[in-house]
């Protein structure tokens, strides 16, 4: 589904990603772990198409297309979804109106019929229960006045409505208490299927107890220095990043 | 100075249409107009909008024209009433003065050039009395009709909201035909004790139009004035609000939304005179500027020595959609009382890049994302319209007018 080859990226001339290679197949869940400043979030932003990041070298192929050639909204319409580490507040933009516009923009792009108001309300009332969100949040402006946990759940709620093929979860666990973490993970797990894939970017192993990855990659200074299965995450948690970095150098 | 000669000729040629008190007013006002200096951008009050460009135009007085529509209760075509509704106490200004509906004090000696010019051409106009204790919802069309000429027109409205009346006036300005228009409009509003008046002005796009508009409001005890001003840039567009809070407990809310694009110009100067204690004013103006458009906002709050316990809020926000658009914004606070609350703020910015990126990651393209953010931006002003139906209609109209840039 996704093949990243020798990806280099920089921001304001500072090189951050220094040669990433990663392959993600449909049905898989990959976790990217790493210390602060290693480039984890940058990778997620580059894949989503943020203009502040310059791709200096490398290729990203997604479902047979050159992902880097697509605009941000085209990537979304092709099924790439980024759950933000810091979801943006949109004062005055109604949550329901926003989500319906987004879903219809994606359906239109794919040549599908636009969803009408009734069908849409049915769809979101199912999905909102999954994330244990209050109905009243739908009537409010996007993320404005939401608690940290509500913002994160709202991200996964949007994901549940938009049904992406490739979900990028950027530090989705940060700022969540254990109950909210379970709800968010439950939402993500409910969407896992043979036809889609998930990349989870996180500091801590904690989230991976709930969203169990097939592969774990350790990202340090813009490079993946180690890859393994879920036991690698547990090892990281026990030994710390420094130890793993040392071992990989040896 | 082509226009000055024409003002003079037109004044002389039309003077016979008036008699008695009105003739007297016209004579005095024209004398004052012709003997005072015509303002230019050398005057502080006109620093960013030079009205003297009007003087190079070829302008002929015109009040002809007709228009029919069931959508409005009152229709003025080039400043002259062409439709009224018998339900309302209304008529032209001469009639109002004659039967005593309009207090003569409204016509006093003015310092403002354009008020003098308007009074010099006080030939038609329209007054409207909102009866005490009555509730009214009135639609007025102010039509500028031009069949290819270069014309000067003087729409003048006098609205008197009697004690305890409660009214909404929706005033739509429409421009029909083509040609050059100099529109010197004046609206006088008196709001008596405990009366509520909500005034919505919806402006129109217009080519080759120069509009100077003065809205003068006098508020008595415990009266409320709520104004929604939706204006559009023109060759020259200047709209001034002069609000006088004359007695205690008066409150005014001024909401405004202005658009300017191309090489057009839009200027608002608002003045709120807090003359007595316990009055409140709340002003929120927002602009969207694109192309090479130029905007000006000057908000003056004047708190007189007697106006203790004044509560005044002023806020002006501007969105620049292009690098070449310009905004001059300036709050002016003059406070001569010591127990008052006054806040003001002005911002100039672009659409939030983070918000645009967020929207795009959900599949909305650049244009749609922009529109969603602009919609939210204008919503904050439109949401203040009390009536839901009017609010929704205004939202539709404004959305349709948002800059559509690919």
Image (tube, rainbow, N blue to C red):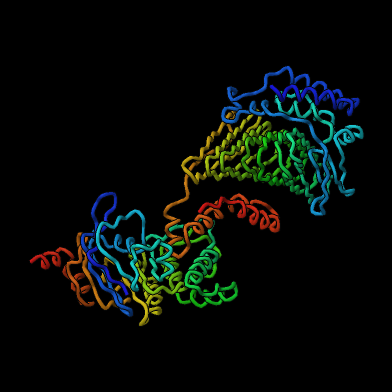
On the image, which quarter does residue B77 sit in?
top right
Give how far across and how far down residue A246 sits, in percent: 11, 64
On the image, which quarter does residue B2 sit in?
top right
Give how far across and how far down residue B80 sits, in percent: 83, 39
* Residue closer to the observer: B57 or B142: B57
Question: Does the rendering let one see residue A32?
Answer: yes
Q: In this view, does B374 lie above or below B120?
A: below
On the image, which quarter does residue B195 sit in?
top right
| Residue B192 placement, left or right of B335 | right
Residue at image position (39%, 68%) is A81
Give how far across and how far down residue B259 sits, in percent: 59, 44
Of all residues, the one furthest to the bottom in this rendering is: A194
Query: Which quarter of the figure is the N terminus of chain B placed in?
Result: top right
| Residue B184 placement, left or right of A227 | right
Q: In this view, does B31 lie above or below A42?
A: above
Q: In this view, does B290 lie above or below B368?
A: above
Give how far across and how far down residue B334 sits, in percent: 58, 28
* Residue closer to the observer: B276 or A169: A169
Q: In this view, does B131 lie above or below B217?
A: below
Residue at image position (64%, 26%) is B52
Residue at image position (39%, 72%) is A184
């Amino acid at each position: 589904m996704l093949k990243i080859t020798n990806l280099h990226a920089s921001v304001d001339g500072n090189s951050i990603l220094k040669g990433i290679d990663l392959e993600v197949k449909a049905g898989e869940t990959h976790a990217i772990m790493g210390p602060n400043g290693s480039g984890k979030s940058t990778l997620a932003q580059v894949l989503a198409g943020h203009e502040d990041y310059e791709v200096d070298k490398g290729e990203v192929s997604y479902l047979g297309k050159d992902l880097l050639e697509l605009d941000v909204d085209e990537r979304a319409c092709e099924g790439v979804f980024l759950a933000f580490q810091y979801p943006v507040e949109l004062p005055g933009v109604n949550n329901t109106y926003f989500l319906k516009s987004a879903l219809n923009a994606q359906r239109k792009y794919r040549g599908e019929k636009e969803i009408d108001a009734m069908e849409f309300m049915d769809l979101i009332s199912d999905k909102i229960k999954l994330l244990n969100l209050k109905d009243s949040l739908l009537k409010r402006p996007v993320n404005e006045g939401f608690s940290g946990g509500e913002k994160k759940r709202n991200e996964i709620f949007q994901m549940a409505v938009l049904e992406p093929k490739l979900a990028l979860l950027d530090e989705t666990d940060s700022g969540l208490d254990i109950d909210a973490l379970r709800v968010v993970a439950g939402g993500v797990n409910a969407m896992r299927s043979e036809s889609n894939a998930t990349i989870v970017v996180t500091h801590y192993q904690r989230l991976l107890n709930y969203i169990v990855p097939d592969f774990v990659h350790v990202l340090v200074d813009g490079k993946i220095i180690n890859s393994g299965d879920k036991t690698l995450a547990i090892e990281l948690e026990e030994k710390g990043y420094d130890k793993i970095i040392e071992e990989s150098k040896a | 100075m082509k226009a000055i000669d024409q003002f003079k000729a037109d004044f002389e040629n039309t003077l016979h249409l008036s008699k008695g008190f009105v003739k007297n007013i016209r004579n005095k006002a024209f004398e004052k107009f012709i003997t005072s200096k015509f303002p230019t951008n050398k005057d502080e009050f006109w620093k960013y909008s030079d009205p003297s460009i009007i003087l190079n135009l070829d302008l002929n007085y015109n009040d002809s024209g007709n228009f029919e529509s069931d959508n409005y209760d009152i229709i003025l075509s080039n400043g002259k009433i062409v439709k009224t509704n018998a339900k309302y106490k209304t008529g032209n200004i001469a009639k109002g003065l004659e039967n005593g509906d309009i207090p003569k004090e409204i016509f006093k000696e003015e310092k403002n050039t354009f008020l003098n010019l308007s009074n010099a051409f006080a030939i038609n106009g329209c007054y409207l009395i909102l009866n005490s204790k009555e509730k009214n919802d009135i639609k007025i069309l102010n039509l500028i009709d031009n069949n290819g000429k270069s014309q000067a027109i003087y729409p003048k409205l006098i609205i008197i909201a009697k004690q305890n009346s409660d009214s909404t006036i929706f005033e739509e300005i429409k421009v029909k035909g083509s040609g050059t228009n100099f529109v010197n409009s004046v609206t006088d509003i008196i709001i008596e004790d405990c009366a509520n008046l909500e005034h919505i002005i919806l402006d129109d796009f217009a080519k080759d139009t120069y509009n100077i508009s003065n809205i003068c409001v006098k508020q008595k005890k415990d009266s409320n004035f709520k104004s929604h001003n939706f204006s559009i840039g023109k060759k020259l567009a200047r709209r001034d609000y002069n609000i006088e809070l004359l007695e205690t407990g008066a409150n005014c809310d001024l909401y405004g939304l202005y658009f300017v694009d191309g090489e057009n110009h839009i200027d608002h100067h608002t003045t709120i005179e807090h003359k007595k204690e316990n009055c409140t004013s709340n002003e929120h103006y927002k602009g969207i500027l694109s192309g090479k458009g130029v905007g000006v906002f000057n908000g003056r709050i004047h708190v007189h020595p007697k106006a203790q316990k004044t509560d005044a809020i002023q806020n002006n926000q501007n969105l620049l959609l292009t690098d070449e658009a310009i905004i001059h914004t300036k709050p002016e606070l003059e406070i001569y009382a010591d127990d008052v609350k006054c806040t003001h703020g002005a911002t100039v910015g672009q659409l939030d890049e983070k918000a645009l990126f967020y929207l795009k990651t959900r599949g909305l393209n650049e244009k749609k994302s922009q529109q969603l953010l602009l919609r939210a931006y204008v919503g904050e002003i439109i949401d203040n319209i009390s009536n839901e139906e009017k609010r929704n209609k205004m939202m539709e109209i404004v959305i349709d007018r948002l800059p559509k840039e690919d």
